[in-house]
Structure formats: C-alpha cells, structure tokens
Image (cartoon, rainbow, N blue to C red):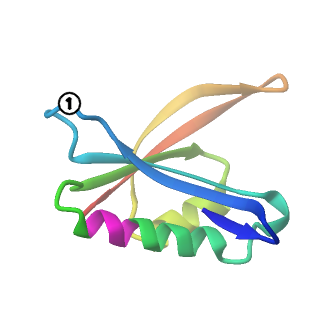
Amino acid sequence: MAEKEEKIISIASITSSQNPRNKHVGTLGIVVEKSYSGLGLGRQLMIELIEWARTNKQTKKIELVTREDNQRAISLYKQLGFQTEGLKEKDTYINGVYYNTMLMGLHL
C-alpha cells in the first residue's frame, strides 16, 4: 500500500490459493490512483512484491490479467519479466465495447 498525506493512493497484493495443487501460483493485483499514474509507483510496488514472492519459499509463479489494449501496463509487465500466456477474447464489456483480456505470467 502507498499513502500520501494519509490518503491511500495505491494498493498491490499477491494472493494464493491454499489448494495444494496450485498454492505455488500467486495472483498479482495492483491499483494506482489515476492522478499518480505514470510516476513509477506501480513499478516500485511490483518490484517489491516480486522480491517478496522470490523469498517466501512457496510462490513459484506470479500471474496477472490486463486488458489487451493497456499497452503501458503490458510494457511494464514485460520489462519486469512477465510473458504472455494467453488471451481471453471479448472477456470484458464496458460502455458498449468488448475488450480482450491478456493473461501473463512470471516464473520465479
């Protein structure tokens, strides 16, 4: 979590299932308030979470999803080592428009 003047401006987490079959996979989620986007905050939080995952002795893979048209985020994820693993076509519907969802993963 990141705060500025006692206001939460970003939240990031990695969550895992407790199912033995897939508890080694963590799902990354991150949200940065729009007015703070593009300042490197998301990158720093992701770097810290990836390092935490590398050292926790359970997480072997991190996965995330993003809209296929979110090129800025995809570029960041690729810079941090994530690779495209799949595409869910017309998975999201917003204001009359269908968007594809990209699945990405990072093997630790």
Q: Nearer the viewer, residue 94 or 21?
A: 21
Residue 34 lies left or right of residue 57; in this view the side is right
Residue drawn at (58%, 26%) of the image? 91
Q: Quadrant of the C terminus?
A: bottom left
Where residue 38 sits, quadrant-wise, is bottom right
By secondary structure, the bulk of the magenta-drawn segment is best described as helix
Residue 69 lies left or right of residue 48; in this view the side is right
Q: Is residue 74 magenta?
A: no
Residue furthest to the front in view is 6
Q: Nearer the viewer, residue 53 or 100?
A: 53
Question: Tag 1's secondary structure?
Answer: loop
Residue 40 horizontal/vertical position (percent): 66, 77
Q: Nearer the viewer, residue 59 or 5?
A: 5
Q: Is residue 51 magenta?
A: yes
Q: How many marks?
A: 1
Residue 3 horizontal/vertical position (percent): 71, 67
Residue drawn at (46%, 66%) of the image? 78
Residue drawn at (39%, 45%) of the image? 15
Amino acid carrying label 1: it is Asn
Residue drawn at (57%, 66%) of the image? 75
Q: Is residue 1 above or below residue 26?
A: below
Mark 1 residue crowding within 10 angstroms, few (<14) / some (14–19) / many (20+): few
Q: Is residue 34 above or below residue 55?
A: above
Residue 102 horizontal/vertical position (percent): 51, 43
Q: Is residue 96 above or below residue 38?
A: above
From the image, tell me which residue sits under label 1.
19
Q: Quadrant of the N terminus?
A: bottom right
Q: Which residues are magenta?
A: 50-54
